[in-house]
Each structure stands twice: as structure tokens, then as C-alpha cells.
Amino acid sequence: MKPIATTAVSLLLALVASLAGAQESFPTRTVTIVNPNAPGGTSDIIGRGMIEPLQRAFKQPVIMVNRVGAGGAVGGAYVAKAPADGYHTLLNTVTHVLIPITENALGRAAPYSPDDFVLLARITSDPLLFIVHPSLPVKSVKGLVALAKAKPGELTFSSPGLYSTGHISMAMLMRAAKVDLLHAPFNGAGPAMVAVLGGHVFMMHVPVGVGSPHVSAGRVRLIAQTGPQRGPAFRDTPTLKEYGYDASFLLWAGYFAHAKTPPAVVKAWQTALRASAEDPKFKAAMAKINVTIDYEDGDAVKAWYGAELKRLESEMREIGKIERRS
């Protein structure tokens, strides 16, 4: 009996070791990054820039798919319902948490909760750029506010969608400056930017990565930025705070996974993301479009994320319900 018992113990230990090894070997197949926004936006630019370094880090294929709809809610809900194995992650901006915060503020059922996810890492952080079409006869925020007060409800602005970053940040400015602007929501930052370039709307709070090439080319006029201080890419452009308007807003982007993702898989993702954020090609790609890499993970990002959620919830309570107008 003793040899049999010894054999059984050996087999059990081998099985445990095998299972542990299987958990530590993530990933063993293709990894999918879900982008809930339209092509051409910030998350799209960041995601495509990280695919190559992530593939090297994981030693497996990495693909990015767009699951667009409801201002990003479709993609978020998809990952929230996906298996908690790390093979489907969500790459999104602050919009991801604005969706449930907004729905809760309006007394509606949210498609998911921030508690359904773990923030693996923050990748970038930048102010939004306040741009206007060259046909608009203003060169400063003060001039724009004066024109808006003279023409209440007539000046249009585009955004990536209802209650998106561009919508809420502009609503914050409207509340602070006591002006009424007409909202034209689009399905993503790329299409919203095209609307401004075509002169179909007058202005927009646009992500740096989407707007800066057009600012540099002179296709749009940059009059302010929304951060609490001036961003590194546009040191000569004042903030809304400098103009006297309490409407600071930062556009950050990060990777989210299902809240029940195993700790070993979370760690594998963070290791790969950290290395990818330091990849020379990725850094050069972000520098080319003036996007600031502001990487953080672990306990530091957890503390920051908790504070950010509280701040955004407070802002939404101040704004209240934003009626859709078209």
C-alpha cells in the first residue's frame, strides 16, 4: 500500500504544480483589446500604438476590436460580461467611468458599474484642447463667452457623444461661464473633429491626440486647454482656470479588466503594459501627437482612481441633468 500512497501523493503534487504553472503562463493564446470608441479617437490611437510592444511582452498575438455604441457603454458592458480570464480587456478613457456615474446621477440603470472592473493601469493623461473653427470671430475664451451671451443657444459644439468627455467638460464650462451652447453629439472623437474641420459646428473640447495635428496645421484655432495647469505640449495656451472659469477636466486613458480577474493575470498585464509604455516606438508615437504618457499601476493607481471617481461624481451632481438638444 505504501508505494501506492506515495504514487498518489506524487501525482497530486504534479497536478497542483501543473495547475499553478498553467495560471502563471498567461497568456497562451490571442489577447483581445476592446476599444468601445470610434476609430480615430484617443483610445484607438493609444491601443494601436501598443499592440506591437504588447505582442513582444506577451509572446502571443494581440488584436484590437471596436465595439462602438452608446458613447462607449456597449464595449464596456461586453468586457464586464466576458470571462474573468484576462483575454478581453477594455482600453478606454475617463468616459468609461463617466457612463455609470451619469446614469446613476440621472436615476437610470447603468449598463455596468466601476466595481465590475479593475483598472490595470493608467497610460496617459492630458487636458482637452478647446478649439474653434477659423470662421468663428473669437481668439480667446473671453471673446467666445461674450459672443455666446450675445447669441444664446446659437453657437454649436460637437462631442464624442451624449455625456462624453467633450460633452461634460463643455457643460462644466457653460455652468461656470453662465452661457448656453448648442450640443451636436457624434459617435466618437474622430467624427466630432471632422464636423469642426468641415465648419458644420463651431467648436469642441478635443483630445490632444486627435486635435493637435489640426492645430499645428492651422485648420482650427486653439483658444484654451481644460487641465488644472498647462499641458506640456501647449505651454503657451492658457487654461480655463486662468481665464477665471472653474471647469478643469483631464482626459486620461487606461486598461480595464473584469473585477474577478486572477491576481496573477492582473500582474502579467501590468508587467506587459509597463514595458510597453516604455517602448521607444510607442513613446515616439505619443510624442508625435503630443499625448503625455503618465503611466501608473498597483497601489498608486488604485488610490488615484478612487479619488478620481469621487471627484467626477461630485462634478456630475453639480451639473445635473443635461438636456439633449439637436
Image: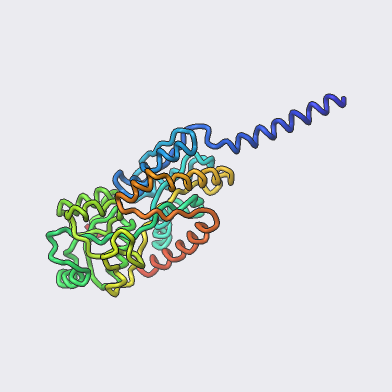
Residue 236 x %, y %: 26, 65
**Residue 77 visible in the shown view:** no
Image position, residue 26 (x, y; %): 55, 37
The image quarter containing residue 163 is: bottom left
Estimate the x, y position of residue 16 in percent, counting from the top left: 69, 34
The C terminus, quarter of image:
bottom left
Q: Position of residue 231 (x, y in %)?
A: 33, 62
Give the residue at x 38% y 45%. 282
Residue 139 seen anywhere in this rendered image of the structure:
yes
Nearest the eye: 286 or 247? 286
Q: For the image shown, how many numbered marks are present on the structure?
A: 0
Is 45 left, or right, of 325 in this rendering?
Answer: right
Q: Is residue 111 above or below residue 303?
A: above
Q: Nearer the viewer, residue 121 or 173?
A: 121
Give the farthest residue toward the right.
Answer: 1
* Residue under the image location 51 percent in, 51 percent down: 118
State the residue at coordinates (78%, 28%): 8
Q: Quadrant of the N terminus?
A: top right
326 relative to 285, above or below: below
Can you name the residue that lies furthest to the front here?
Answer: 280
Which residue is located at x 74 percent, y 31 percent?
12
Question: Which of the 4 image quadrants contains residue 292?
Answer: bottom left
Q: Colour scheme in the image?
A: rainbow
Q: Is residue 93 left or right of residue 6?
A: left
In the rendered image, the residue lying farthest to the bottom is 244
